[in-house]
Amino acid sequence: MTAVQGSRKPAPTLPRTFPRTALAIGLAFAMAGCASVDIDRAVATSNDDAADFTQGALQLARTPEQQRDREAAADALLAQPLDQNAAVRLALQNSPQLQALLAQSWADAANGAQIGRLPNPVFDFERMRTVDELEFGRLLAFGLLDLITLPQRYGIAQRRTAQANIRLTRDVVAHVTQVRQAWVRAVAAEQSVAYARQVNDAAQASAELGRRMQAAGNFSRLERARQQAFYADAATQWASARQAVTATRAQLERLLGLTEAQAERLRLPPRLPDLPKAPMPPDRAARTASAARLDVRLAQASYEAAARAQGLTRITSLTDIELGVRHDTMFDRAEGGSTRRNGYEVSVRLPLFDDGSLRRDAIGAQTLALTHQLEATLRAAGSQLRESYGAYRTAYDVSRHYRDEVVPLRKLIAEENVLRYNGMFISVFELLADMRAQVNSVIAAIDAERNYWLADAALQAAIVGVPVAANPALPAGVAGSAGGPMLAAQGGGDAGH
C-alpha cells in the first residue's frame, strides 16, 4: 500500500515531513532505550537480598585495578587461619567461578532485555534514470507493529531482567552454601585424622605386644590374630582419613578458586566451632522465611514474563506491519527543473500459509506450565523448610548428646580403667581396647558436629528459598569417616579381650 503526493519546485528544499519523522523516530529510540541492563545495580540488589551470605562483598571485577584489589584482599585473608566467614569472603573475592556466574548473569539479563528494543529501521535508496529524467528514491521503513507493541515488549524485558537478577542471587546463595559446607567437611576431616592416628598407634602397640606374648608362650594364635587384624583395619582407616583430608581440602580449594600458590598458604582452624547454646526455634525459622523467598520470587517472575509474552504473541503471530516514509526526487534534464514526491508505504504480511496457531499454542502451554510450577513452588516451600529444619534439629540433638553424654561417659570409663590397670585388675589389652573405644566415640562426636554444621548451612539456604542437601554427595575418599563402623565394631569386639 503506497500513498504519494507530488509537487514541482524549482529548487530543492528539505521536506516538512522529515522533522516530524525524525521526532517520531527519536521518541521511539528514547522509549526503546529504557530497556537496559545495569549489572552494578543487579549485584547491589543481590548484596541486599542475600546480605547474610554475601556480606556485601559481591562484586564483578571488570578492570585490572579491581582485579588487583581482589587479589590483595585474598592475600590478606590467607594470612590468617580461615574460619567459615573468612572462607566465604575469600570465595567472593577470589573465585573465578563466582565471577563467571556474575558475567553470565549479565549476559542473560542483556539477552532477556533485548526484546524491549525496537528493531533498527531500514533505509532504502534507489537511483533510476530514463532518457530525460533522473529519479532518486529514499525510503525509511520500520516495523509499525513493533512500535505499537513497544509497551508490552518493555514489560517483558523488565520481567526477564528481574528473572536474571533473582537467578543470580539464588546461584550466589547456592555457591556460598557449598563453600560453607566444604569448609565444614575440610575442618572435620583434619580434626578426625588426628584421632584416627591415635587408633592406629594403639592398634600397632597392641599388635606388637601380642606378637611378643605369643613368642613367649603367653598368648594363643587366635588372640594374637585378633590384635593383628585390628591393627590392619586401623591402618586402612587411617589411610582413608588422610585421603579424606586431601579430598575435602581440594574441594574447598576449588570452590575458593585458589591458585597453587594460594593453596599452599591455606590454613584451617584445628577444630569446628562449638555448638550454639540453643538451637534455632522453629517459629523463628518459619518467621524468617517469607514471601520474599527466592524460589517463589523466581517462579512468580517467570510466570509474569510468560503471561506478558503470551499477550504479545497473540498479536505478532497473526501478521506483521511495516511502515515506510518515502521521499523521491525526479530531475527533468530537458527543462532543468525537479519534482518531489513525499508519501508513505504500509506493508502487511498476510497469514495465508502460517496463521501462527503453533506459536500461540506453544506460548500458551509454556504459560500454563509456569502457572503450575508457581503453585508447586508455593506448596513445596513450607515442606522443604520443615524438612531442612528437621534435619538441622536432629543433627543438633545428636551432636549435643555426644558432647554431653557419650564422650563424658567414655572419658569416665577410661579413667576408671587406668586405675584398675594400675591396681593390676585388668590387663594391658583391656586398657588398649577401652582407649580405642574412647577414641571412636570422639570421632563419632566429630562426625555428629560436622553433620550439624552442614545442616545449619543447608537450613540458612532453605530459609531464603534455595533448597540444598544437608549432606550432598561427598568427594571420593570422604565417605568413610576416620572412625567408621568397622573400627567401632572392631573396638567393641576387642573390648572383651
Image (tube, grey):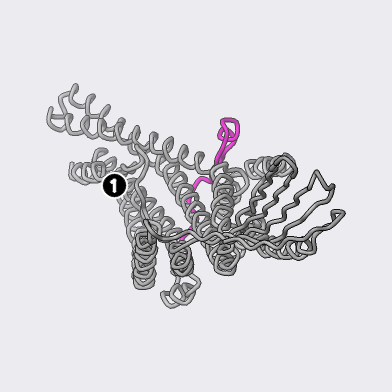
Packing grade of label 1 (10 A; few <14, some 14-19, many >=20) is many
Along the viewing direction, whichever of 472 and 352 lies nearer the viewer: 352
Q: What is the residue that sits farthest to the front in this orientation? A: 334
**Placement of 224 over or under 393, stated as above or below:** above
Compare residues 252 and 442 and report the one nearer the observer: 252
Q: Quadrant of residue 490?
A: top left
Q: Where does the C terminus fall, quadrant-wise?
A: top left
Q: Where is residue 371 shown, x and y percent of the image?
A: 37, 70
The amino acid sitting under disc 1 is Ala
Is residue 274 inside the magenta stretch? yes
Vertically, is 416 above or below 145?
Answer: above
Q: Nearer the viewer, residue 139 or 224?
A: 139
Find disc 1 in the rendering and name its residue.
Answer: 437
* 268 left or right, relative to 245: right
Q: Nearer the viewer, residue 347 or 25?
A: 347
Which quadrant of the structure image shows residue 222?
top left
Does residue 243 show up magenta in the picture? Answer: no
Magenta stretch bounds: 257-276
**Magenta-drawn stretch, dominant element (helix, strand or loop):** loop
Residue at screen point 63% across, 61% down:
35
Does residue 451 appear in this view? yes
Element under label 1? helix
* Residue 165 seen in the current view: no
Residue 6 falls left or right of residue 185: right
Rendered residue at 18%/29% (across/down):
224
